[in-house]
Image (tube, rainbow, N blue to C red):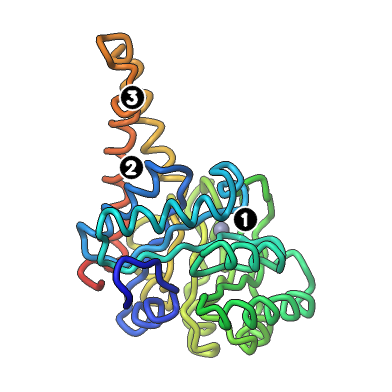
Amino acid sequence: MQQYKLVSAREEIKKAKAGKYAIAQLNINNLEWTKAAIEVAQELKSPVILGVSEGAAKYMGGFRAVAMMAQGLVESMKITVPVILHLDHGQSVESCKAAIDAGFTSVMYDGSEHSIEENVHNTTEVVKYAHAHGVSVEAEVGTVGGTEDGVTGGVNYAKLEECLAIAKTGIDMLAASLGSVHGHYHGTPKLGFKEMEEYSHATHLPLVLHGGSGIPDDMIKKAIHAGQSKINVNTENQEAFAKGVRAYIESGADKTETGFDPRKLLSIGVKNMKETMKGKILLFGSNNKA
Ligand SMILES: [Zn+2]
């Protein structure tokens, strides 16, 4: 590994599958989020995937701005654990290519809304471009329920033949939707553990679990055992952050002396979020694997 450089997910995800642990994808929204995720990973000696949706990239000023911020933090903070910058739910081939050109080291092409033929066709194009640039690729089959970044869908379970078709494109990891949802779960999640095991064996691919927030710990462990090697966490970190900022403001701390300083205003939020991130990495078992 080159020193202080963002890396592809390729080797790390293979190691995770073989070692029966999962790497956390922590979605980022700004500098605080990015720094928190990287700091926690370094502290726990864990690889980490920084997830960036198209909407989040736009919010932060664009793919290039995000890539330079993440790369800059890794360099300035002398981060030695593998940090992967990943486009989450790339909506088009063009968008994946743009992220790669900007310096992302991993992309997800989400063609789950299309027919399996079109999904395979587009994923193939992304894989060709990504692998030529040393970038890893995640594809999706079936649809994750709930809403993320304005994209809403009902749960639609992935079929084995579709997983096998997409696996042939040469992707590095597969998001096979098996009952998870983005955002909050209503009741207990109904995850297809049997299918996870079956698909993981049949495709030989590390699986990706979207909607990792709100799944009970024992189910997460079972999912990892069944072949999930990357678990996306977003909502829980956002809630932890919001709760901290709310506590700060409700205590009136922003009205005292220099309490309005954004570094203070956001401090409890950041601290809470780091605790949540730490908990996830320890639960997924990727600590001391970097
Ligand atoms: Zn997702």
**Mark sitting earlier along the chain (3/1):** 1
Q: Is residue 82 above or below residue 25?
A: below
Q: Position of residue 154 (x, y in %)?
A: 68, 55
How many residues crowd mark 1 within 10 Å: few (<14), some (14–19), many (20+)?
Answer: many
Q: Position of residue 254 (x, y in %)?
A: 32, 15
Q: Is residue 172 above or below residue 243?
A: below
Q: Is residue 72 above or below residue 198?
A: above
- Residue positioned 54% across, 60% down in the render: 180
**Mark sitting earlier along the chain (1/2):** 1
* 86 on left or right of 236: right
- Residue positioned 55% across, 55% down in the render: 64
Q: Is mark 3 within 8 Å of ligand 1?
A: no
Q: Is residue 202 above or below residue 159?
A: below
* 131 on left or right of 33: right
- Residue positioned 65% across, 72% down in the render: 141
Q: Amino acid at mark 2?
A: Met
Does the CB distance between marks 3 and 1 fall below 8 Å?
A: no
Residue 273's disc number: 2
**Mark sitting earlier along the chain (2/3):** 3
Q: Which residue is mark 1?
A: 145
Residue 29's disc number: none
How many residues crowd mark 3 within 10 Å: few (<14), some (14–19), many (20+)?
Answer: many
